[in-house]
């Protein structure tokens, strides 16, 4: 519960390093393991040790100098292989549960319509969290699965750590994929893990000058807003 509180509070400050936060979680779990072991609950404490080691590994993989979202093994169709679900289960199931709790706690809407046919938001863990219509989905998470009930929707996955940005080539690919869908009059839904940090007023990409070497994930949105000028 304490880890969940710390994680939720850190979401309010996007400058707080994800890798440091996960390292704090690993340290907390390690201390809990040591405490239970001193009480004689050796067998009961072993899952805490394993969860601590997994968190420490992911804190390294999510560091900006490494930035290895592919470590979690998310497939292009949004599913996770069995080995990943087993190996990283302490983290994967924690973030799934936390995402649901965070949405209930904050009371935020699951998505926002930026303009006609263009939506942004957080992970849609159930069908009612998805915008209406046969929406094309751009998934910008590496730790959350695609809901199997969305299999009929066009889907593109860009595995990205929470609060991190994809590589420029990934952003470019997503932009033109979404532009093609927009040209077909298909609504677009772009989501990250929690969807609480979209700030359209800060977008400065110059689409008509073909400046595609974009640094931040959410510049995708500004490109999509200008797609009507490109199709």
Image (cartoon, rainbow, N blue to C red):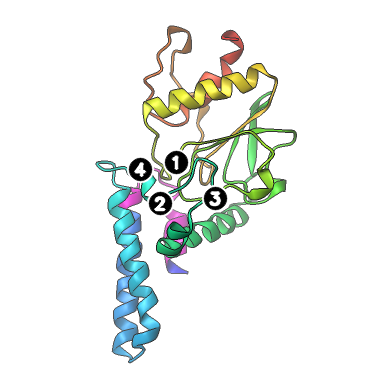
In the rendered structure, are the residues bearing label 2 and label 4 in contact, judged by CB atoms less than 8 Å apart?
A: no
Q: Alpha carbon of mark 3 to alpha carbon of mark 2: how far?
A: 11 Å
Q: Which residue is mark 3?
A: 145
In the rendered structure, are the residues bearing label 1 and label 2 in contact, judged by CB atoms less than 8 Å apart?
A: yes
Q: Alpha carbon of mark 4 to alpha carbon of mark 3: how far?
A: 25 Å
The span shown in magenta is 3-19
Whether residue 203 sits left or right of residue 17 in the image: it is: right
Q: Is residue 194 above or below residue 53?
A: above
Element under label 2? helix
Report crowding for label 1: few under 14, some 14 to 19, many 20 or more residues within 10 A (C-alpha).
many
Q: Which residue is mark 1?
A: 159
Look at the image and tell me in which quarter the C terminus lies.
top right
Precedes in sequence: disc 4 or disc 3? 4
Q: Is residue 15 above or below residue 105?
A: above
Residue drawn at the location 51% of the way across and 50% of the way down = 144
Q: Which residue is mark 2?
A: 72
Precedes in sequence: disc 2 or disc 4? 4
Precedes in sequence: disc 1 or disc 2? 2
Q: Which residue is mark 4?
A: 15
Q: Quadrant of residue 2?
A: bottom left
In the rendered structure, are the residues bearing label 4 and label 3 in contact, judged by CB atoms less than 8 Å apart?
A: no
Report crowding for label 3: few under 14, some 14 to 19, many 20 or more residues within 10 A (C-alpha).
some
Q: Alpha carbon of mark 1 to alpha carbon of mark 2: how far?
A: 9 Å
């Amino acid at each position: 519960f304490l880890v969940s509180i710390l994680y939720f509070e850190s979401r309010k400050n996007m400058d707080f390093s994800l890798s440091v936060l996960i390292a704090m979680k690993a340290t907390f779990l390690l201390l809990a393991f040591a405490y239970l072991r001193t009480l004689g609950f050796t067998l009961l404490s072993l899952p805490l040790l394993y969860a601590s080691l997994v968190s420490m590994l992911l804190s390294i993989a999510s560091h900006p100098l490494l930035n290895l979202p592919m470590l979690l093994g998310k497939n292009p169709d949004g599913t996770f292989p069995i080995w990943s679900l087993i190996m990283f289960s302490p983290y994967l199931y924690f973030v799934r549960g936390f995402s649901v709790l965070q949405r209930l706690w904050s009371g935020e809407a699951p998505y926002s319509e930026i303009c006609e046919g263009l939506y942004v938001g957080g992970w849609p863990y159930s069908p009612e969290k998805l915008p209406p219509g046969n929406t094309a989905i751009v998934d910008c998470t590496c730790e959350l699965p695609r809901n199997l009930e969305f299999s009929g929707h066009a889907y593109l996955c860009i595995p990205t750590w929470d609060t991190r940005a994809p590589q420029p080539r990934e952003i470019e690919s997503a932009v033109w994929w979404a532009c093609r869908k927009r040209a077909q009059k298909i609504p677009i839904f772009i989501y990250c893990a929690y969807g609480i940090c979209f700030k359209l007023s800060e977008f400065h990409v110059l689409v008509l000058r073909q400046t595609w070497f974009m640094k931040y994930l959410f510049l995708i949105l500004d490109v999509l807003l200008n797609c009507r000028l490109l199709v």
